[in-house]
Image (cartoon, rainbow, N blue to C red):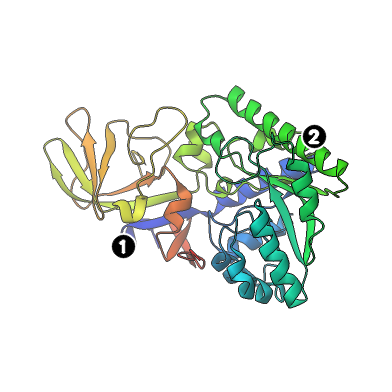
Amino acid sequence: MHITELRTPAVLVDVNKVRSNITRMQAAATANGVRLRPHAKTHKSPVIARWQIEQGAVGVCCQKLGEAEVLAAAGIEDIRLPYPVSPTNADRVVRLLDRTRLSLIVDHPLVARGWSDAMHAAGRTLDVLVKVDVGYHRCGIDPALPDAGAFVAQVGTLPGLRLTGLLSHAGHAYQAQSDEELRAIAAAEARLLHQVAHAARAHGATIEEISVGATPPARFSVREKGITELRPGNYVYFDRMQVGLGSATLGDCALTVLATVVTKHLDRVIFDCGSKTLAMDQARGASQPGHGLVFSGLDTVAPDDNLRIEQLSEEHAKVRVLNGSTRLEPGDRVRVLPNHACVVSNLVNEIALVEGDQVIDRLAVAARGMIT
């Protein structure tokens, strides 16, 4: 089937680009002796997770227990949640432990104690890592606090828990403006993690894992000494944001949105891919105005610099014609590179797998909407 036969809006994923992205990241991790554990929140697909594991990934990350439950049911055998899951979900975690090797993070004494009490009562042992705030200031213990190492060591003494190491997410890397800034963020992240690890070991803790995760600095993090695990997610598809951050080229980007021109007026055209498809995320990195990049052809080779998606409503993309004229007419098809591919995955029930302009399969986004 040719892509123009699809009803729109439709999310297209280029199989060859996905496989190339998986192979390239795995090769970088393997060459540097680092375990790769991709974050599955980008694709939310057990099928693509298996592609990653077949290439050498040790397992996957999920953001929520609902995602982990879907992937575990599909046979994924090693899942990590780098998210502060509440101990009120202990019953779900116990059930997951029967189906997969599961680990999660803690960064607060009450949460750590809650998981300890729950696992001890259930007669189970749960692998945990302590999350460290390396600059994003969202979750994680402050590495500058004098008792940071003591807290990590204390977690390792709690019944029902097995401390495996430290974990971080340099989310502030998405605001970087250059490779030099990304390199510095990766170096600072590693330094802070080693600082906390050293302090924790001084208090008697065993730290086996030092885990980092974010696609923008991944190409630098993978070369930092002492890092044992890399957890990028977006690299499997890439998107306009990653192009702006220098993590990818347009040719690496595997996910696009196929849309139809539904009407045309003097200075604008309207596509049928509104916020329910493209989401509202703005691109970061180098200056990239608008809600996505419109290609000048269905082959996604070159962007159409004359078109800017300046506004989204639920079903409409309002596209400004910058020089006053465009060849597009109602009924024409266009492809759009989203600003943020991860959000787009969560907005659709299925993706169309394509090779060039041919649809070769449909793939359910099995873990979409799993927000609990």
Q: Residue 7: which disc?
A: 1
Residue 178, visible in the rendered structure: yes
Q: Secondary structure at mark 1?
A: loop
Q: Amino acid at mark 2?
A: Lys
Question: Where is residue 155 shown, x and y percent of the image?
Answer: 76, 55
Q: Earlier in the sequence, mark 2 or mark 1?
A: 1
Q: Is residue 148 left or right of residue 15?
A: right
Q: Nearer the viewer, residue 61 or 119?
A: 119
State yes or no: discs 2 and 1 in contact (Cβ < 8 Å). no
Percent of width and height locating residue 325: 18, 32
Work out whether 282 lies above or below 73.
above
Residue density around tag 1, few if under 14, some if 14–19, many if 20 or more, within 10 Å: few
The residue nearer to you, when weighing 326 against 91, is: 91
Residue type (three-letter) at the residue carrying disc 1? Arg
Residue positioned 28% across, 35% down in the render? 308
Find numbered disc 2 in the image and state the secondary structure of the residue it sits on: loop
Horizontal side, residue 233 vs residue 224: left or right: left
Quarter of the picture holding the N terminus: bottom left
Residue 40 image position (x, y, % from top left): 58, 57
Left or right: 248 in relation to 210: left
Circle 2 or circle 1, nearest the eye: 2
Crowd band around label 2 with a 10 angstrom C-alpha radius: few (<14), some (14–19), many (20+) = some
Q: Which residue is mark 2?
A: 225
Look at the image and tell me whether residue 78 can be seen.
Answer: no
Q: CA distance from mark 2 to mark 1?
A: 49 Å
* Point 63% across, 30% down: residue: 185
